[in-house]
Amino acid sequence: MSAQNSVAPIIIKKKKVISGGGHHGGAWKVAYADFVTAMMAFFMLMWLLSATTEKQRKGLADYFSPSIPISRVSGGGNGAFSGDSMFSEDVMPQTGTGASNANPVDAQQARGESGLDASAEEKAETAEFKSIEEALQGRGGESMVSVEMARHIVTRVTDEGLIIEMFATEDAPLFEEGRDTPTQLFRDLMRMVARVTGVVSNDIAIGGHIRSHPVVLADNPVWELSSSRADVTRRLLESGGMRSARIDRVTGHADRKLSSLNPMSERNNRIEIILLRK
């Protein structure tokens, strides 16, 4: 009896093990790494937004949210893909990739393919523009323009309409230097344009463009001179038989839309007459 009372009691200890080690664990490192990655992506986004132009950002936005099927670039294939040859100068402007102008403005961009067929009215209007182009360039039938005048004319069909551009050369200016007085060559051009465009009833937009002048000039005349020359063009067209009601706008663009890489080139002295689409 005494032996049984002398036996020591058995004590069982249960040790609770906490996995992760509390604040010494590694779970917080994963969350921190995700946070740093997100911040880095945010700052890269802010930097890219500041380094791109408004037109580039709009292009990116349109790419990720297209509203209509657009195919601006030719694939160069055939058959089911209906591709065009990348070497075709006549086809590439129609698909939006063959603009010959080095710095085309919005109104001069090729029309592109929207996946929608043109209406009968639009096709008829384009056919009228093509016939006017042929008349201005002396193609097809009796020529209405001399060789001397034809070398000063460039035409192109855009979304805005048919653009008739008349530009000066070093040996044949359209206006007297620094003035809005037209030369005899420009008067003849205006009579011819008024006669050729009389076959359609589209409204007319007139734009005057001037070459750049030295920045040392105290009074730079580009704005006043381009506007004045555009208005002189309007008066010459009206005197040539064009109805004044067809004139939609007369604008002076100064030297903001140059057509030559040399900003002071005589080629930048030009007048644009646009037959606006209906």
Image (tube, rainbow, N blue to C red):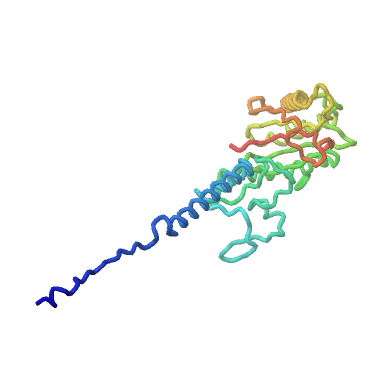
- Pinpoint residue 28: horizontal percent, then vertical percent: 44, 55
Q: How many labels sit on residues?
A: 0
Asked if residue 78 is positioned above or below residue 117 in the image, the reply reads below
Give the residue displayed 20% in from the left and 71% down from the top: 10
Residue 240 seen from this side: no
Q: Residue at (67%, 31%) from the top-left corner?
A: 205
In the rendered view of the protein, which quadrant contains the N terminus?
Answer: bottom left
Which one is nearer the viewer's eye here, 38 or 206? Answer: 38
Check the image and name the residue furthest to the left.
Answer: 1
Image point 63% across, 64% down: which residue?
Answer: 77
Residue 108's place in the image compared with 174, above or below, is below
Relative to 254, say whether 82 is above or below: below
Near-viewer residue (86 or 193): 86
| The one of 69 and 135 positioned closer to us in this rendering | 69
Quadrant of the drawing holding the C terminus: top right
Left or right of 75 in this view: 41 = left
User: Residue 11's x, y, as percent?
Assistant: 22, 69
Residue 179: x %, y % from top left: 83, 24
The reply to whether residue 69 is visible in this rendering is yes
- In this picture, residue 182 sits left or right of residue 90: right
